[in-house]
Structure formats: C-alpha cells, structure tokens
C-alpha cells in the first residue's frame, strides 16, 4: 500500500449497565486509550504499549487492538496493511471501565481510516459487538455520550445515542484489585421471576430518564435485580460501597462487570457536598477517586498530516496529544 497514511485514534473508557440496564446501557468517560499506526520497520514488535497495564498486554499479533484491525480488513476483504501500533493507555484494566472494548474500537477505527474503506459507524458497532460479545461498552466507546442498545425480533442490533444531562458529572471509584469479566458474568442467574423482570424494566426507565435530565434520580430505585445481587458474593467491597453511596443519596452503580463503582452527581457548587461524601466513602474502602467527565465525541481518528475535525493542525482534541 504505497500511499499509506498513518493515523492516530483516541477511544474513551466506558461504564456499562448503569444499574438495571444490563448489557444495554453505556456511558463514555474521559479516560482514554490512544493508538497510532507506524511504519512496521520502525519498531521491533507489532505493538509498543505504554501506560496502564502495558506489561499485561501482548506485543505481537495476538494483541487485541491488532486482532480487531485485522478483523475489519478481513470482513471487507481488503489487504491487511503491515503496520506497527504505538499505544498509550489510561484506562485501568479489568476494572469495569471497558478497556477491552476500547482496544477493539481502536483497532476497527484505525483499520477503517488507514485502508479508507467506507464502513459506517453502525457497521463498526456490529463488528465490535461480534468480537466483544455484547454492545454496551463498544457502542459508547465508538459513539460517545449515553448509548442504549436493543435487538429487534430478528436479532438485529438497534443503537441510539444521546448526550447525558449537562448538569450531571460522573465520578469513578477504582479499587486496586482486578476482576475478570468472564468470572463476573459466570455468577449471574440464568433467569429472573416475572415480578423481578417488572422491577428491572421500571428501574431501567427511571435511570435513563435521570441520566438524560428528564427527572432527578431517586437512589431507592436505581439498583439492579440481575447482576448486582449475584456479584455481591465476588465483589463484596464494591457492592458495600454502592449501598453506602445510595444511602447517602447518590446515584451510584457497579460499573460494568466491576469492581469499579460509578456515580453521577450534580456539577458545580450544588454537587460539592455529594462529591465530598463520595470521596470520603471511597477512601474508607481503599478506592481511588477519579473526577472524570462524559466523553461526547467517542472514537476520534486523525491522520498524521492533518486533522480529522478541524481540517488543519492545532486542534484541541487531537488524539496525537495523548501519545
């Protein structure tokens, strides 16, 4: 590919489920994975990784970013460019913040940019879901904002995106311990009684309205009946923290498969007492507090010799600034 243009992508962390929206709801957050393609001959391994978990990810063709890159090329039947990848990650691994989804989205979007194939975001969400197995992290990682995913009667994925309420800000409370997604999913019940399904559906609607600013969240009805009770046994500290935060009047949930806990609170002066209470409870349990924000852009890709947003250099959101 003689006219190859190298690109850089930044992909946000995500918090999925958001309480009762299991495998359906997800938010994009301002912790990022940045990945750049480079000439293959300029580096000794396929992937050079820095940042969070750099020593725990593969440097060869087994790397998840590269596998997603190849997956898209194969699916659209274009030759796989022999490029190297440079990655800088700020998303904690195995903490329920979508690190694997960010890697998948990074690989897919880079492959689209480098090869120039006309693949739309809807098809990228489908491809990412095929690799990840569920859409609630990959969709907001690609699209940004608050995303709700559902399937129609034929199994077709339907995705809708909206900006979260401007008066809200997210906080993530990250423990030092990890929890693999597969282990966290293994403890879930295979079915729920009808009355529990009714509660789950009504609470999912309440949470969606609260996060979009239709009404304030009531912490008494933001909890989940499917995954949170089952995960108490394997993430007791995280679930204890979730309970204490809700008792303190905060909208809190187990982020994805955990063990990170996420909170949505008011911005500015109105939210300061809640932020302070949240930080106090987190410290008691040994969780690190990250005052993040909603990422409204999703995956941003820019060529080395230009800008994907402004069309010229100097863009404030340039992914290359994160490398």
Image (cartoon, rainbow, N blue to C red):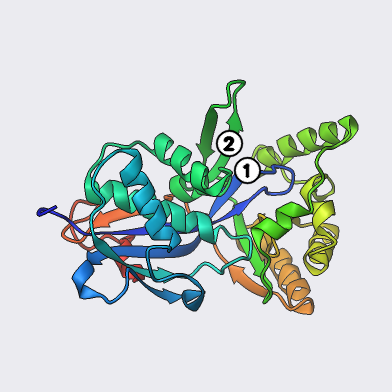
Q: Which residue is mark 2?
A: 149
Residue 166 seen from this side: no
Give coordinates of residue 6: x percent, y percent. 21, 59
Q: Is residue 10 placed above or below 216 in the rendered structure?
A: below
Name the residue at 17% across, 56% down: 5
Q: Secondary structure at mark 2?
A: strand
Nearest the eye: 320 or 150? 150
Give coordinates of residue 41: x percent, y percent. 19, 71
Give coordinates of residue 39: x percent, y percent. 20, 67
Give coordinates of residue 260: x percent, y percent. 68, 64
Q: Which residue is mark 1?
A: 25
User: In the picture, which quadrant includes the C terminus?
Assistant: bottom left
Crowding around mark 2 (Cα neighbors within 10 Å: few <14, some 14 to 19, many 20+) is: many
Q: Earlier in the sequence, mark 2 or mark 1?
A: 1
Residue 138 left/right relative to 96: left
Contact between marks 2 and 1 (CB within 8 A): the answer is yes
Nearest the eye: 89 or 261? 89
Marks 2/1: CA distance? 7 Å
Nearest the eye: 21 or 65? 65
Residue 292 seen from this side: yes
Q: Secondary structure at mark 1?
A: strand
Q: Is residue 79 placed above or below 37 in the rendered structure?
A: above
């Amino acid at each position: 590919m003689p006219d190859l243009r190298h690109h850089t992508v930044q992909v946000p962390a995500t918090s999925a489920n958001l309480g009762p929206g299991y495998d359906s709801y997800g938010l994009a957050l301002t912790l990022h994975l940045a990945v750049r393609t480079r000439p293959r001959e300029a580096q000794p391994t396929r992937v050079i990784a820095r940042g969070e978990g750099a020593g725990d990810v593969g440097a060869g063709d087994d790397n998840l970013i590269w596998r997603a890159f190849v997956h898209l090329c194969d699916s659209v039947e274009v030759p796989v460019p022999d490029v190297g990848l440079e990655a800088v990650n700020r998303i904690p691994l195995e903490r329920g913040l979508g690190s694997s989804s960010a890697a998948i989205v990074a690989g897919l979007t880079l492959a689209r940019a480098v090869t120039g194939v006309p693949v739309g975001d809807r098809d990228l969400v489908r491809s990412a879901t095929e690799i990840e197995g569920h859409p609630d992290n990959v969709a907001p990682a690609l699209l940004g904002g608050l995303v709700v995913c559902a399937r129609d009667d034929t199994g077709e994925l339907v995705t809708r995106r909206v900006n979260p309420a401007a008066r809200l800000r997210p906080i993530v409370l990250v423990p030092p311990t990890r929890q693999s997604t597969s282990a966290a999913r293994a403890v879930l019940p295979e079915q729920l009684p009808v009355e529990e399904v009714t509660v789950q559906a009504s609470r999912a609607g309440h949470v969606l309205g609260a996060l979009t600013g239709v009404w304030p969240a009531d912490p008494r009805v933001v909890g989940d009946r499917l995954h949170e009770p089952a995960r108490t046994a394997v993430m007791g500290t995280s679930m204890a923290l979730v309970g204490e935060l809700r008792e303190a009047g905060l909208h809190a949930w187990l982020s994805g498969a955990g063990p990170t806990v996420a909170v949505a609170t008011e911005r500015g002066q109105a939210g300061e007492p809640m932020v302070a209470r949240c930080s106090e409870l987190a410290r008691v349990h040994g969780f690190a507090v990250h005052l993040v924000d909603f990422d409204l852009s999703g995956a941003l890709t820019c060529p080395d010799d230009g800008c994907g947003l402004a069309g010229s250099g100097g863009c404030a959101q340039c992914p290359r600034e994160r490398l």
